Amino acid sequence: MRFFGYFRSSSAYRCRIAFNLKNIQPEFVPVNLRDKDHRKADFLEMNPQGLVPVLDTGDARLSQSLAIIEWLEETHPAPALLPSDPAARAHVRAFAQIIACETHPLQNLRVLNYIKENYGQDQAGADEWCRKWIGDGLAACEAIAAAQKHGGGFTFGDTPGLADICLIPQLFSADRFGLETAAFPRLREIRAECDAMPEFSNAHPAKQPDAI
């Protein structure tokens, strides 16, 4: 099993956490986005969208972090990253998609490059853009997480799951773009729980072999 990713990619970060929670360690193949490795012909053959991550299982090449994580859940069901109840599973998926589908894409490198090249934004303008959309997304996540009554340390219970896998990389991005997170006390509590686990801490971008 080979995993193609980039240390600072939030999508790849999600997958690293999921691999660690499942105790699976694929061979890592770095794809340097700054050097445009993702636009080279051999990578585009694997993923025509030209985005990381990609997981080569030996039988299939999978893209999109949530699809990869769902594949992991289906092929390596323990420990579970999703609850068994259908409604509860839908709530977890919805939380994850607030981040993966509604928030993270707006801070993607290709989007930031586009607003710089076509709308005259410098890095400060791009960072402000990111703070706006990350802040809106995390505000929704805070409301959902704070409304849970389970009493556990994680977003939807006493064990980490898909919601936490998506949340932690997004909080890393909030720090990176200078967003103050004091307004999200429940998310900060969840982050502290996750940071105490090696499965999360070892997935941090700074600890990856391609970190620069």
Image (tube, grey):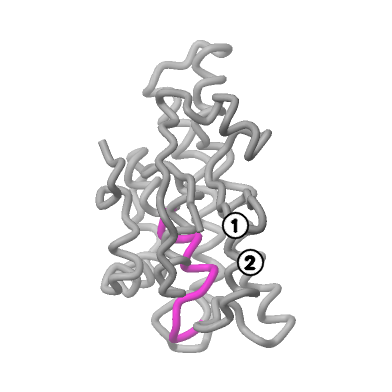
Label 1 crowd bin: few (<14), some (14–19), many (20+), radius 10 Å: few
Alpha-carbon distance for marks 1 and 2? 17 Å
Tell me which corner region of the image, top left, top right, bottom left or bottom right, holds residue 187.
bottom left
Specify the principal SS of the magenta part. Answer: helix
Mark 1 or mark 2, earlier in chain:
1
The amino acid on which the numbered mark 2 sits, given as a three-letter code, is Glu
What residue is disc 2 on? 70
Where does the image place residue 54, in percent across and percent down from the top left?
A: 56, 47
Tell me which corner region of the image, top left, top right, bottom left or bottom right, holds residue 126.
top left
Q: Are marks 1 and 2 in contact (CB under 8 Å)?
A: no
Q: What residue lies at 36% left-to-right and 54% top-to-bottom?
A: 181
Q: Is residue 27 inside the magenta stretch?
A: no
Q: What residue lies at 63% left-to-right and 49% top-to-bottom?
A: 63
Instruction: Using the image, tell me which numbered label, if any, was put on residue 161.
Output: none
Quarter placement of the C terminus: top left
Where does the image place residue 149, in percent across and percent down from the top left?
A: 52, 86
Where does the image place residue 110, in percent across and percent down from the top left?
A: 54, 27
Where does the image place residue 11, in percent across and percent down from the top left?
A: 51, 49
Vertical placement of residue 47 versus 157, above or below: above
Which secondary structure lies at badge 2?
A: helix
Q: Residue furthest front?
A: 58
State the residue in front, 108 or 130: 108
What residue is disc 1 on? 58
Q: What residue lies at 47% left-to-right and 57% top-to-bottom?
A: 14
Residue range highlighted in magenta: 157-169
State the residue in front, 157 or 16: 16
